Image (tube, rainbow, N blue to C red):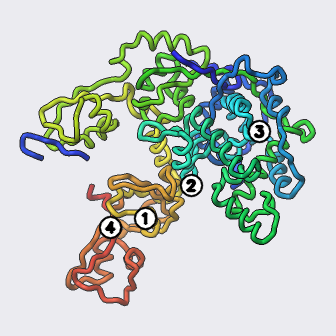
Amino acid sequence: MKYISLSIAAALMLSGCQSTLSQNKPESPEIRQEEQTPIDIASAIEINQALLADEAIDVIHPVEDVSIDLGNEIKESYLTDDVWQRIRSQLNFQIPENRRITSQRNWFVKHPDYLTRVGKRAAPFLYYIVQELEANNMPLEIALLPIVESAFDPFAYSHGRASGMWQFVPGTGKRFGMKQNWWYDGRRDVVASTQGAIKYLKYLNKFFDGDWMLALAAYNSGEGRVQRAVRNNKKKNLPTDFWSLDLPKETRAYVPKLLALADIVKRSDELKIQLHKIDNKAVLTKVDIVSQLDLAKAAGLANLTLTELQRLNPGFNRWATDPNGPHYLLLPNHKVEPFKLALAKLEKKDRLTWQRYKIKNGDNLGLIAKKFNTEIALIQQINKVRGNQIRAGKFLLIPVATASLDSYILSQDQRLAKTQNRELAGTKRIHIVKSGDTIWDLSRSYNVSMRNIAKWNGMAPRDTIKPGQKLVIWQKSAVNKIANKQAIPNTQAIIRNITYRVRKGDSFARIANKFNVTITEIERWNSLKRNKYLQPGQKLKLSVDVTDNI
């Protein structure tokens, strides 16, 4: 099998809807302080802890990496036992002394524990990034960009729909080679996202005629936004360098953050900052697995826990790899040969677990795929089903997860469940999305911000929502009262939006009492005033607590 050695920068000791045809027709992040530890070579235990770190660790924004061993191509001057020294020897950006850089540098210097923590999280990936940048003749300052973007968290997801360690939004990710579908998201894949980030940064550097400061600013806010700022300054006969442009507040701080980090790496001794030392060697290998493979089975073959395997391969959304590729896994070097031997002995039919399912009246491919947590196209492909018609009484062969779904704790579904199950202050409500709902409408109905709804549900405010989707909403106090009693904080209520047709004799007060809502809410939901008469037949939107009726 083909494979490419990857870096983890220290020895990683890991132990492990369609119809049925039936007979009848049918900004600076808040950083948690932690005790400062002696700075030494990252140990196997520390690397493992970094990989399995809780996702609640403070993050800035998302990015992704993986490192390819260049072997004999490594220049002799880079033969050092410390990746930071390898970076330090190649830093070239000019770092002006100005208030914006000084304030960012001072913040990092005052928070050495944060730099230590980020260093530990960077340990699995930094060697690879450095190696890829060198191979592409890129400035090594860019190796520090994942710190600014995501603190090396491949599962980070920002309010702007950016995902992965390199924080790609969906469109830009696809533009630079990152496949995204139900099974897989290349923005989180270490290899795909790092290669994509390098391609994008090369493009931006060329777009701005070799000006890396403008290219980095555009990486944050888009080339169009930076180009407009340059044009505006030209019209006013003003300088067009990064420091002179009128850019968004986040972008104005973004480049100084990177330069401040570069300055700290370059002058760490002078600034009395001890960087968490990372071994300058590859410890991961990219292994060709040829075709789709259940992640639980892969973990067993590699003698890893399922969580360890998912941490190394964060691009996979579900319980198995994408049936259409990419067909590779990242594994610790010392696990590669045993894994390849075990995989070679595994018969093709045993790569997944199968269930024989008898089609029932009323079934359709969409319902069956949802029931077995798989995809319609895969069922069609395996069973040679053309189109969407299936016949009751016939059998389908369905691929299913080897382990229970909640065992795949880093799959998209389980990460969402973890986010939605977090306990917060106030009253938790479950809203089942109906046709026509939007996050904006729900924010008005529940009197909460769009950003908070997105945050509580692991999404971005501009993400689309679908009928039947479950959303968690937290309110400081209960909006609705059940049986005229104040709802108890931290209890769960299920809210549905309904359309009520006004009847003869109805009033605001009568409707409010009938559905246990307030007149003020009815006014807000329908942009009405209570001094206006309601007309029979008039339709009103209401958000009604249906907890006791389910």
Give the camera-side residue of 96 and 22: 96
315 up-or-down from 284: above or below: below
Give the image quarter of residue 538.
bottom left
**Badge 1 density bin: few <14, some 14–19, many ≥20, Cα 10 Å:** many
> Reading the chain from its start, which is encountered first: label 2 or label 1?
2
Mark 2 falls on what kind of element? Answer: loop
In-image side of 95 versus 66 (left or right) = right
Question: Could you give the CA–CA distance between mark 4 and mark 3, rounded to whole angstroms?
Answer: 65 Å
Label 3: which residue?
139
Question: What secondary structure is found at the residue carrying circle 4?
Answer: loop
State the CA–CA distance, disc 3 to disc 2: 27 Å
Q: Which residue is mark 2?
A: 160
Question: Which amino acid lies under the numbered mark 2 shown in the image of this protein?
Answer: Gly
CA–CA distance in space, label 4 to label 2 = 40 Å
Q: Amino acid at mark 4?
A: Ala
Q: What's the amino acid at mark 3?
A: Pro
Nearest to viewer (mark 1 / mark 4): 1
Q: Mark 2 or mark 3, which is nearer the start of the sequence?
A: 3
Q: CA distance from mark 1 to mark 3?
A: 46 Å
Residue 35 is at least partly visible in this image = no
For disc 2, the neighbor class at 10 Å (few under 14, some 14 to 19, many from 20) is some
Q: Earlier in the sequence, mark 1 or mark 3?
A: 3
Proximity of marks 2 and 1: CB atoms separated by less than 8 Å:
no
Say which residue appears at 30% left-offset and 71% top-offset: 515
**Residue with the mark numbered 4:** 483
Residue type at tag 1: Leu
For the point 43% across and 21% down, the residue is 297
Q: Position of residue 511 (x, y in %)?
A: 29, 77
Look at discs 3 and 2 and give the one toward the viewer.
3
Q: Which mark is residue 442?
A: 1
Q: Which is more toward the observer, 370 or 227?
A: 227
